[in-house]
Image (cartoon, rainbow, N blue to C red):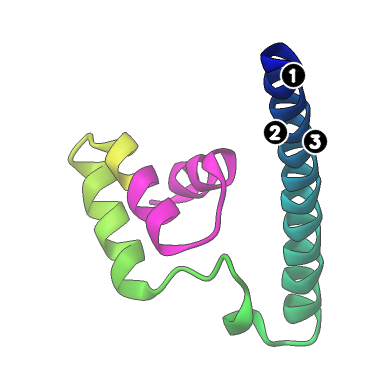
Amino acid sequence: MEYSAIALVCIVGLLAYREISALKREIRSQEKRLDQLAKLTGHGDLSSHLVPDEIKEQAIQLKRAGKEVEAVKKIREETQMDLVEAKEYVDRLV
């Protein structure tokens, strides 16, 4: 009896995890589409990846100081970029 209850809880947990993962993927896909639409319509300031000038300047200063990891972390905190996108953004900074 106890084992069947534990197995049931595990199965429900796995199904919930799978559903949450699928929803997260869908949200990321929709965000990318919205960002593309914002750029195409001339509303780049509505993009979820817009980096405010002061944050961009802080990231540049961190990069120049040799603290590239902290610069990436700062960009990720302020935008909805994932790790790879934030790293590529910091790499492109002067």
Q: Earlier in the sequence, mark 1 or mark 2?
A: 1
Task: Say which residue appears at 72% left-offset and 87% top-offset.
Answer: 42
Task: Say which residue appears at 39% left-offset and 44% top-offset.
Answer: 72
Q: Is residue 12 left or right of residue 68?
A: right
Asked if the residue under mark 2 is in contact with the one under mark 3, i.e. CB atoms within 8 Å, the reply is yes
Task: Say which residue appears at 82% left-offset and 67% top-offset.
Answer: 33
Q: Nearer the viewer, mark 3 or mark 1?
A: 1
Magenta span has 77? yes
Dominant secondary structure of the residues highlighted in magenta in the image:
helix
Q: Position of residue 90 (x, y in %)?
A: 44, 46
C-alpha separation, residue under disc 1 versus residue under disc 2: 10 Å
Quadrant in which residue 39 is drawn: bottom right
Magenta span has 22? no
**Disc 3 secondary structure class:** helix
| Identity, as a three-letter code, of the amino acid under mark 1 | Ala
Quadrant in which residue 4 is drawn: top right
Q: Nearer the viewer, mark 1 or mark 2?
A: 1
Q: Which residue is mark 1?
A: 7
**Please, is residue 81 above or below residue 84 in the view?**
below
Q: Is residue 74 left or right of residue 45?
A: left
Q: Position of residue 66 (x, y in %)?
A: 22, 34
Q: Which residue is mark 2?
A: 13
